Image (spheres, helix red, strand yellow):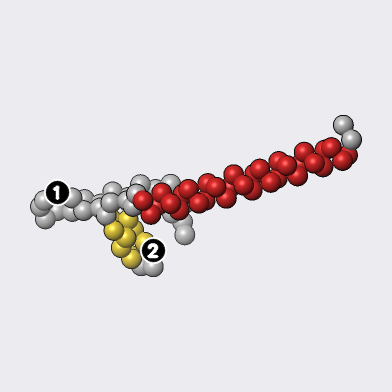
Amino acid sequence: MSIGFASRVAAVAAVAGIASFTCQRIADARDRRRYPPPGRHVNIGGRRLHLVEMGQGSSPVVIIPVLADMTR
């Protein structure tokens, strides 16, 4: 395998990766417009909380699934 061939293969792989990344970002943006999540965003101390209200009664239950570090 010559250096020229390896360079071409690397260039093709880089272009394919960039094209794949771009297509995925466009599809994600389109899906967010087409299928918005239920509920609304609420500002709580400078952070946004996705809030979905349902049911009846006066005792609220808040469930916050955490995937990130809470030390911030």
Look at the picture and state if 5 lies above or below 46.
above
Tell me the tag on residue 31.
none
User: Which residue in the structure is indicated by mark 2?
Assistant: 47
- Nearest the camera: 46 or 21? 21
Question: Measuring 46% from the left and 56% from the top, which residue is drawn there?
Answer: 71
Outermost residue to the right: 2
Give amino acid for label 1. Gly
Look at the picture and state if 19 lies above or below 71.
above
Question: Measuring 28% from the left and 51% from the top, which residue is drawn there?
Answer: 38
Q: Secondary structure at mark 2?
A: strand
Left or right: residue 3 versus residue 10 is: right
For discs 2 and 1, the disc positioned in front in the rendered view: 1
Q: Secondary structure at mark 1?
A: loop
Left or right: residue 28 versus residue 2 is: left
Give x and y (percent) for residue 58: 11, 55
Image quarter of the N terminus: top right
Question: Measuring 84% from the left and 37% from the top, which residue is drawn there?
Answer: 5
Question: Measuring 88% from the left and 39% from the top, which residue is drawn there?
Answer: 3
Outermost residue to the top: 1
How packed mark 1 is, by other alpha carbons closer than 10 Å (few <14, some 14-19, many 20 or more), is few
User: Which residue in the structure is indicated by mark 1?
Assistant: 55
Real-space Cα separation, disc 2 to disc 1, in angstroms: 25 Å
Give x and y (percent) for residue 13: 71, 41
How packed mark 2 is, by other alpha carbons closer than 10 Å (few <14, some 14-19, many 20 or more), is few
Give amino acid for label 2. Arg
Give x and y (percent) for residue 41: 32, 60
N-terminal-most mark, 2 or 1: 2
Give x and y (percent) for residue 48: 36, 61
